[in-house]
Amino acid sequence: MRVLWSVSLLMFVGASSLLAQTQVSGGGVCAKPDPGYSIQATDRPGHIFTLGRYPCTWSKPFEIAGTKSKEGPDIISVEIQGNHGDWSEFYVDTTDTGDKGYYRFHGTATFKNGALQDLRGKWTLNGGTGKLKGIKGSGTCTGKGEADGGVSFECEGQYSALK
């Protein structure tokens, strides 16, 4: 009887988690970094580390828990080896209601003559303030380098308000 009860409870919790997930999609642009840094590694040509603070805005915002993504600073670091890069970033989104969401991104990028061509990766949302407190989410993003040194991006995924 206890086993049946435990299995039933696990199935209920799993089903309610699936039902509580909401799909999101959106996109925008991050302007060139300010400040931006680049350091050549000393092992071989074309091995470079970059770090920048990119001001980002959403032209097609995520709609999460009654808020819309608006803008924020995106701190991005990239290790470039020739035409390949591995990137990580931390983004704090300020929504139209003033709430903040805390995002992390990781992925890969391709470069040509040192200029970003495209990127792809995964994102996670790990809470925030106000209506975004306790929110969890994840998904994927793609992007491309812009001529002015910025990046345009498109993201999709899902979030859950379960705490």
Image: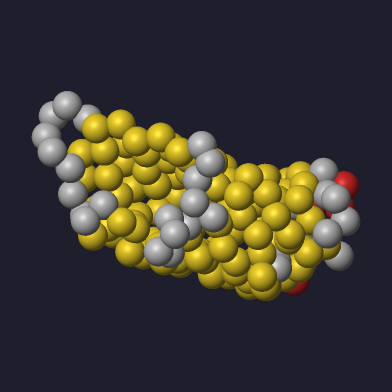
156 with respect to 9 (left or right): left
Q: Is residue 3 above or below residue 147?
A: above
Q: Residue furthest left?
A: 44
Examine the image and state in which quarter residue 65 appears: bottom right
111 with respect to 139 (left or right): left
Q: Is residue 44 above or below residue 119?
A: above
| Residue at (63, 72) in percent of width and height | 25
Identify which residue, 89 or 30, lies in the foreground.
30
Q: Residue furthest top?
A: 42
| Residue at (85, 50) in percent of width and height | 98
Identify which residue, 40 or 68, lies in the foreground.
40
| Residue at (66, 64) in percent of width and height | 58
Identify which residue, 161 or 63, lies in the foreground.
63
Q: Residue furthest front?
A: 148
36 with respect to 43 (left or right): right
- Quadrant containing the N terminus is bottom right
Question: Is residue 51 visible in this depiction of the protein?
Answer: yes
Question: Is residue 121 visible in this depiction of the protein?
Answer: no
Identify which residue, 126 or 93, lies in the foreground.
93
